[in-house]
Image (cartoon, rainbow, N blue to C red):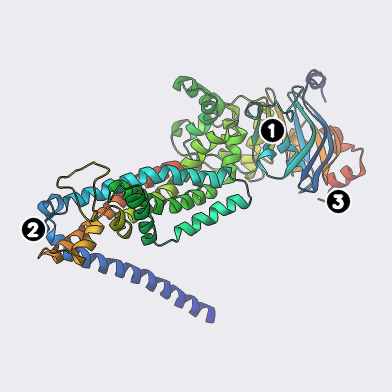
Amino acid sequence: MTQATVQETTQATQEKLRVQHLNLFYGDNQALHDINLSVPAGSITAFIGPSGCGKSTLLRTLNRMNDLIPGVKIDGEVLVDNHNIYAPDTDIVHLRKHVGMVFQRPNPFPMSIYDNIAYGPRIHGIKKKRVLDEIVEKSLQQAALWNEVKDRLNKSAMGLSGGQQQRLCIARLLAVDPDVLLMDEPTSALDPISTLKVEELTQELKEKYTIIMVTHNMQQAARISDTTAFFLNGVMVEHGETDRLFTNPTDQRTEDYITGRFG
Amino acid sequence: MKSKATDRLATAFFWGIGLLILFILVWFLWHILGAGVPHLSWDFIAGEPEEMIEGGGVGPQLFNSFYLLFLSLLFSIPFGIGAGVWLSEYAKKNWFTDLVRISTEMLASVPSIVFGLFGMLLFVTVFGFGFTILGGALTLSLLNLPVLVRVTEETLRAVPTSYREASAALGATKWQTIRKVLIPSALPGLVTGVTLVAGRALGESAILIFTAGVTVSRFAPDLNLFASGETLSVHLWYVRAEGLVPDAMQIAEGTAALLVLVVLALNLLIAIPSRLMQRKMTGKSS
């Protein structure tokens, strides 16, 4: 690590998000056990672990997407900017505007590219065509998609390739101007070239956004993240700087997983 | 070798069925239109009906068909789609929801003549409307309601969950998601449902004989909701069953052809814009 990056990481230690004693149940089945985690602003955190370890479930508690699933019970706290998002006075619409999510499968709406990007700003009350035009262009540029689609903004987003659709979904999210981007295995349905593009994109975005990404691809976690958390059976086994965790894990189970002994 | 022969047999069988259906349809249209179209003239389509002498038209009946259709859709679409949205998006999974769903399904299988008798009892007798267009339209709405509820619920359920998640993750409220994502995505299915009930409403006779009656105003168009209003389908039944005019056969043939053409035109009128819109949404060229 160079001197400059060390300084950067120390400067970026301002805390964005904190999970405290979080337990989650699906009915009688406990899926997450006493999770404690702190995420600094302007960093990329990777959640790794085998299928069913609870990493996606945890990600979905961070913007309360689990609210859509019946039978989910949660105790503990998730603090975003020091506000507990599970407090009764939380405005979920406001929360999701600040903590946005990109899903495993690209899920553009069956509308034009323009309307997809403008969807978020429109529901948050922006009506002026000129402002929307600006947001659409800026978001698509941030998602590195503008040059590919600028001549067909009025065509359906369903006609884009899978990789383009996923970048469109990222652009759609950026258009509502969030601070935290939750990404749930965003490249698992993409080909290697599209994956590379999305990975490069995350590197650019982390300057402005706090990113938390679930991935089942350990190389990907090692390539792009600053810190990594390893999960197993609903427990967070280890959380630390990515370089350290992959070269010198403190827990035997982490070592077994990253060396490919299971999973 | 055996599976290959079976496959060939199956291919031939399904092709045969397809062609048979097409043949029946063509034969049917040929028969109806062949017999009826020669009787169609402006005097017939727009003219006044006659009770005793030859040469009556079906103008008021044609108008009443559409007037009743329009009114019944006006009453049934808001309630039908509303109930479908509730069942699909709001209703909790419990005995009450199941009860509503089962009741709707049972209503959908009630014979239309039962609705007709119910409508007569309620609107004609209890409310004392007599035979009216309003009573007919309301009873038709009752017939169409369960179909609309089912179609709406099913098309909304068919919209991928990922759309709901994507919309929620952008900070949309439930209502915004329903209005801006789910309903537009489900629109082709909803349009199919509305076309279905519209066709049924145009063709319905049993209900209307009991509620809207078999007589028409002396002038058309008569927008009076409390006038009696015979439709084309009812007229078709009436002239063949009770008509005294000497040209009853010709009038029936002409009415049948007109009815078929009207239903066909209505279907195309709804289907073409819907198809175009779907193409625009999905970006597919087929």
Relative to the observer, which residue lies in front, B43 or A41? B43
A76 lies above or below B98: above
Q: Position of residue B254 (x, y in %)?
A: 17, 60
Label 1 vs label 3: CA separation?
A: 33 Å
Q: Identify residue type, mark 3.
A: Arg
State the SS at label 1: loop
- Residue designated by label 3: A261
Q: Residues within 10 Å of mark 3 (few under 14, many from 20)?
A: few
Quarter containing the N terminus of chain A: top right
Residue A172 location, quadrant? top right
Q: Identify residue type, mark 2.
A: Gly
Q: Position of residue A88 (x, y in %)?
A: 72, 28
- Residue designated by label 1: A63
- Residue designated by label 2: B55
Q: Chain of mark 3?
A: A
Q: Position of residue A216 (x, y in %)?
A: 74, 44
Q: Is A120 placed left or right of A10 in the picture?
A: left
What count of labels does the image hold?
3
Labels 2 and 1 share a subunit:
no
